[in-house]
Image: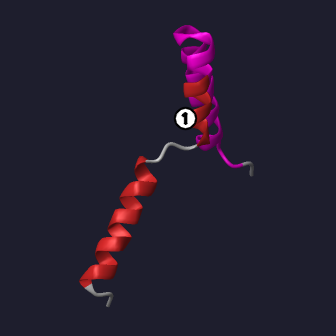
Amino acid sequence: MPDAHHLLLFVAAGLLLNLTPGPDVLYIATHGLRQGFAPARRRRWAWLRAALCTSWRRPRA
């Protein structure tokens, strides 16, 4: 069983990793800063559709 100090460090590291944006968020944010809100919104919806289609696809039998 880890002691309280190590557990606190583990929880802090986990929170920090969850709050850090991933490459997809950075891509959409920089695209929005360069070209404006509407192109960034289109990229976001394209990414969301791709993520949903690949995660909900049925396995082939």
Q: Residues within 10 Å of mark 1 (few under 14, many from 20)?
A: few
Q: Residue at x 55, y 44 (%)?
A: 22
In the image, residue 35 above or below residue 46: above
Choose top left, top right, bottom left or bottom right for residue 46: top right
Furthest-right residue in this view = 61
**Quadrant, the N terminus:** bottom left
The mark total stands at 1
Q: Residue at x 47, y 47 (%)?
A: 20
Q: Is residue 50 magenta?
A: yes
Q: Residue at x 37, y 72 (%)?
A: 10
In the image, residue 45 above or below residue 23: above
Residue 54 percent location from the top left of the image: 65, 39
Write the start and end of the magenta stretch as one range. 31-59
**Amino acid type, label 1:** Val
Residue 27 percent location from the top left of the image: 62, 31
Furthest-bottom residue in this view = 1
Residue 39 percent location from the top left of the image: 61, 12
Q: Which residue is mark 1?
A: 25
In the image, residue 33 above or below residue 1: above
Choose top left, top right, bottom left or bottom right for residue 12: bottom left
> Is 50 in front, or is 36?
36
Q: Residue at x 31, y 77 (%)?
A: 7
In the image, residue 29 above or below residue 14: above
Q: Is residue 32 magenta?
A: yes
The secondary structure type at the circle numbered 1 is helix
Q: Is residue 20 left or right of residue 55?
A: left
Q: Is residue 54 left or right of residue 15?
A: right
The reply to whether residue 52 is in sight is no
Query: Main SS type for the magenta part?
Result: helix
Residue 5 percent location from the top left of the image: 28, 80
Choose top left, top right, bottom left or bottom right for residue 34: top right
